[in-house]
Image: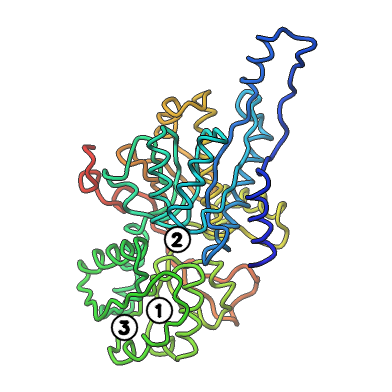
Amino acid sequence: MTDRTKKFVASDKRRKLILGASGAAATAATSPFWFNIAHAQNKAPIKVGFPTPLTGPFGTEAQDQVRCAEIAIKEFNESGGLNGRMAELLVRDDKLNPGEAATRTLELIEKEKVSFVVGALSAAVQLSVNNVCKERGIIYNSISQSDAISEIKDFSKYTFHEAMNPHMTSGAVARYAIPKFGKRVVFFTPDYAYGHEMLRGFQRAGKELGMETLADLRYPLGTSDYTSFFPRVQSLKPDILCMINFGRDLVNAAKQAYDFGITKQVKIVTPVLLISARMAAGPEPFEGVVGATSYYWKIEDSLPSAKAFNDRYRIAHPGTVPTDYGALGYAGVRAVLTAARNAKSTDSDKVIPALEALKYDFYKGPQSYRKCDHQSVQSLILLQSKSAANVRDKNDVFDVIGIDNGSDKMLRSCQELGHKA
């Protein structure tokens, strides 16, 4: 466990992350008792629960989610909060475990009395968090990819999904890669919800392009050795090896593919191309790898909202830039707080219509929540990893090779998901 991870875990166990100044409280000695009670209630902090896997294979991404969420909290407080009410971020380590996540979320709601929950970094974990929230009438804004969370069996009016979903992500990569690199594809598929949904999205888009699936090689979450798969890949001679790995799993798979010589024999694509994974592995294993992301900091060259967000992050964390999944932490928290301010309330039933009506550009261009399933409609950025020789800035490791602008056409229809409209 890294020192930074230990710091977050210790913080989770011993204290709440409280950002910004709180409103001044009237004292009982100088004011009537009823006035003090009303004043305290009016100035009570707005608590945002934030379960995320600070420990485990997604810890790097989770920690940046927290850093970026803190920026959203600070902005809200510095702009006056909600009629003087300040916001607090209460972080909990869900340990990438649905049961643990449910327990921590229940604590946040029943013990800490949070107004909203934002977070999670696993398809299965977010469904667990969502189930607790919807049973208790608390808005949950998920910042991890999932198709299922928007489907009628898991959805509720309290469920919002700020992150992209596997259908839109893997579909965009398939539509780019297959015409360019070829139709014969082998998949590395993590055997849990995220992997299954990414595979389905890629294959669905690929079917329209004449794609042929040569093999679907499954592995459990947290697998560290992929070398047994590579002889099969070589024997099949695919045009594309689609690695659906995420986080540390993606780092390991990319390094081993490079060491095995696979990168010289086949084009590697990954639905979610993470800057954190590329930084951890170095340039060689990722050279030429193609994928998609919800956010890449270099879009600041053409987008003022991205530049403003990046600058705030740089002030808080000099020499670094926000990551893709980190930025989702920022947007997820900022969205619920903005809607609360617009609704002039933290009551879920009043904030829900404000979220549904929200048209926002916090950091990456125009976004909005589709009313039927509360999925955030947003742009998707296609990337290709640079070679070491082409890296001029240590943080600028990708070329932007395309942007798929947000639209309902990127999504499965409301009817397919089981919604009436």
Residue bearing the label numbered 1: 268
What amino acid type is highlighted by mark number 1? Answer: Ile
**Picture coordinates of residue 35, whole percent (x, y):** 67, 10
Above-or-below relation of 36 to 380: above
Name which residue type carries label 2.
Ile
Element marked by disc 2: strand
In primary-sequence order, the first of circles 2 and 1 is: 1
What is the secondary structure assignment of the residue under circle 1? strand
Marks 1 and 3, how far apart at CA: 9 Å
**Measured Cα–Cα span from mark 2 to mark 1:** 17 Å
State which quarter of the image contains the N terminus.
Answer: bottom right
- Along the line of sight, the residue nearer the viewer: 306 or 1: 1
Q: Is residue 343 left or right of residue 317?
A: left
Q: Quadrant of residue 220?
A: bottom left
User: Percent position (x, y) of residue 419?
Assistant: 23, 40
Q: Is residue 211 above or below residue 227?
A: above
Residue 157: % across, % down: 35, 35
Mark sitting on residue 239: 3
Query: Element at badge 3?
Result: loop
Residue in the picture at 34% in, 57% down:
168
The reply to whether the C-beta atoms of the residues labelled 3 and 2 are less than 8 Å apart is no
Towards the viewer: 87 or 164:
87
Could you tell me which residue is drawn at 55 percent across and 80 percent down? 387
Residue found 50% across the figure and 66% down from its top: 274
Which amino acid type is shown beneath numbered disc 3? Asp
Tell which circle, 3 or 2, labels the residue nearer the N-terminal end.
Answer: 3
| Label ID, residue 27 | none
